[in-house]
Amino acid sequence: MKTVRELVNSKSLTKISMITCYDYSTAKIIKDTDIDIVLVGDSLGMVIYGYPSTLQVEMEQMVFHTEAVYRGLEGQKLLVSDLPFLSYQASTRDAVFNAGRLLKAGANIVKLEGGRRVIDKVRAIVDADIPVMGHLGLTPQSINVTGGYKLQAVDEESIENLFEDAFALQNEGVVALVLELVPEEVAKKLTEELSIPTIGIGSGRFCDGQVLVINDMLGWFKDFSPKHTKKYANLSEVIFSSVNEYVSDVKNGTFPGEGNVFHLKKEVDFEKIIRKFKVS
Ligand code: KIV
């Protein structure tokens, strides 16, 4: 498993790969892959719970899913877990307490959204010896002020703000920075200027690493494939046709087959019991 220190030191040495994961069964598979980092993202609100945004996600859900993924990974992967909306914004006490809960659930690092406006929370969590990953650019927990899921840092003022936020986070000791939906040129320059690794999603080719939502890259949703994602599989089709094949097997009697059934041992006198219960 990569350690937090190795993650920080890997900048410019090797590209960092990160993927989201929300459940035990998937984590069991991911454990044996080459992925560097696993993220229990608050995107679970949308992909697992069907919420309209990440704003509805509760701390308890993040704890339960972090525990499940941790059990599946068996300590083989560096695990990052998201602090959900309202778990850190209201006070530094909330921030430290909830970050600690994620660590107790198995996370090695907590991730939170925002820069200078949450810097006191970042400082408090880092002071409690809990590693923090930052998240700038599109920050879905601020969707009501940023105005939708769209490209960020597109004008001079917002680019300047992004740089200020990134350096403020680095100064407070965050171990890495997720850059979501930022123009490639901006992410490239920021990556060159920062000493901590950047991990991009929809932010071009020059970040130190990449992160994808597992459901997107596996093609879980038939009608949803964001431009920044590459589809490595077509699971929606696999699931759809497998379920229909099963239904057809049940209807035409080919499932269960002889290989799927259990028989009585020869020594059991089943006939005797039948005779006993036979209504004459
Ligand atoms: O919640 C999430 O999945 C994330 C990634 C998009 C980086 O924060």
Image (spheres, rainbow, N blue to C red):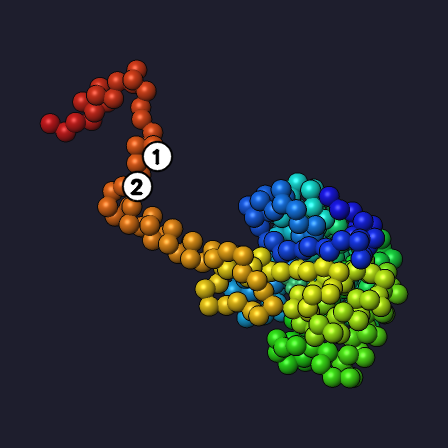
Quarter of the figure that contains the C terminus: top left
User: Residue at label 2?
Assistant: 255
Q: Give residue 29's quadrant in the image.
A: top right
- Mark carried by residue 119: none
Residue 26 picture location, percent across and down: 56, 48
Mark 1 touches mark 2? (CB < 8 Å): yes
At 72% from the left edge and 59% from the top edge, which residue is drawn? 209
One can see residue 11 in this view: yes
Mark 2 burial class by Cα count in 10 Å: few <14, some 14-19, many 20+: some
At 69% from the left edge and 69% from the top edge, which residue is drawn? 203
The residue nearer to you, when weighing 136 against 15, is 15
Q: Which element is circle 2 on? A: loop
At 70% from the left edge and 42% from the top edge, which residue is drawn? 75
Is residue 260 shown above or below 101? above
Relative to 243, 122 lies left or right: right
The residue nearer to you, when weighing 107 against 169, is 169
Residue 8 picture location, percent across and down: 82, 54
User: Residue at label 1?
Assistant: 260
Q: Give residue 137's quadrant in the image.
A: bottom right
At 82% from the left edge and 61% from the top edge, which residue is drawn? 196
Amino acid at dot 1? Asn
Q: Which badge, 1 or 2, is on the more N-terminal residue? A: 2
Mark 1 burial class by Cα count in 10 Å: few <14, some 14-19, many 20+: few
The residue nearer to you, when weighing 172 against 4, is 4
Quarter of the figure that contains the N terminus: top right
Is residue 184 shown above or below 230? below
One can see residue 85 in this view: no
Amino acid at dot 2? Phe
Relative to 189, 43 lies left or right: left
